[in-house]
Amino acid sequence: MFGGAFDPPHLAHRTLLKTALTELKLDAMRVVPTGDAWHKSRPLSAAAHRLAMVHLAFDDVPQIQVDCQEMARSGPSYTVDTLRHIAAAEFGAELFLIMGTDQAVALTSWHDWRAILQIAIICVAARAQSSDDQALNSSAVFDAEKLFPERFLHLSMPATPVSATQIRNMIANGQPVQTLVSEPVARYIAEHHLYLSH
C-alpha cells in the first residue's frame, strides 16, 4: 500500500512505486489517495481532481490498483483502518506499507501506529533533504524502528529532489513542471487550471 494526498502525483512517486514493486517482488500495489487529511495544514484539491490525476499517473502499470476507500469515508481517514480493510480482503497476504523518510520519522504520532506495525512491514524510501529537513537522513533509524526493527525495510533508491509542494509553487509562479509530472498529469493540471494561486 502507498497512500498520499497526490496533490499532484509526480514522477518521484512513480519511481518509488516501480522500485518497490521490483525490490519487494510484489503481486500488487494499492495506491490510496487520502480522503479527509486531518493532518494537513492546508486544504487539499478536490478529491475528484486528485483521483483523476492518480489514474493518469499510474494506470499504465499493471500491478497498480487505485483504491479510493479513504475518499469514500466520512470524517478523518486513518492508515490503520485502510490496512485492516485490505488485510481482511486479502486474507493471508503479506502486507507492506510504503512511505518516505518524512513519514517514517513521524510514524509514532500516527493514529494506532503500533497496530500498523502488526499488520504491515514498513518500507522506507529516502527523500531528498531540504534545509528544513536535516533530521531526515536515509541512514537514520526512526523511533518506531528502534522499538520494532524487524518490522522495517529500507528501499534502495536514490533520494529524489521533487515534492508536490514544490510543483504547486512552481505552477503558481508560472514555471513549467513537465519534467516533474507525467505528460497526462501536466495536461490535466493545465486543462483544469489547478494550483494557479498559492
Image: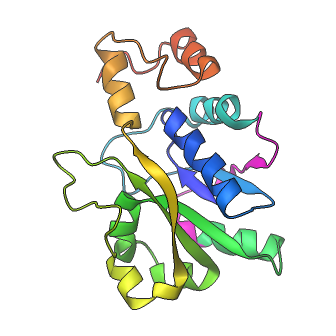
> Which range of residues does the magenta coloring cover?
60-80
**Where residue 2 appears, x then y in whole percent?**
59, 56
**Where residue 58 appears, x then y in whole percent?**
69, 37
Q: Quadrant of the C terminus?
A: top left
Q: Would you identify the image quadrant in which residue 191 lies?
A: top right
- Relative placement, left or right, of 163 versus 27 is left
**Where residue 49 appears, x then y in whole percent?**
58, 29
* Residue at 19% in and 56% down: 134
Res. 77 in view: no
Counting every numbered tag in the picture gives 0
Q: Is residue 106 magenta?
A: no
Please identify the residue farthest to the bottom as the structure is shown. Answer: 147
**Where residue 52 appears, x then y in whole percent?**
66, 30
Res. 48 in view: yes
Q: Is residue 102 above or below residue 91?
A: above
* Residue at 38% in and 27% down: 167
* Residue at 33% in and 76% down: 141
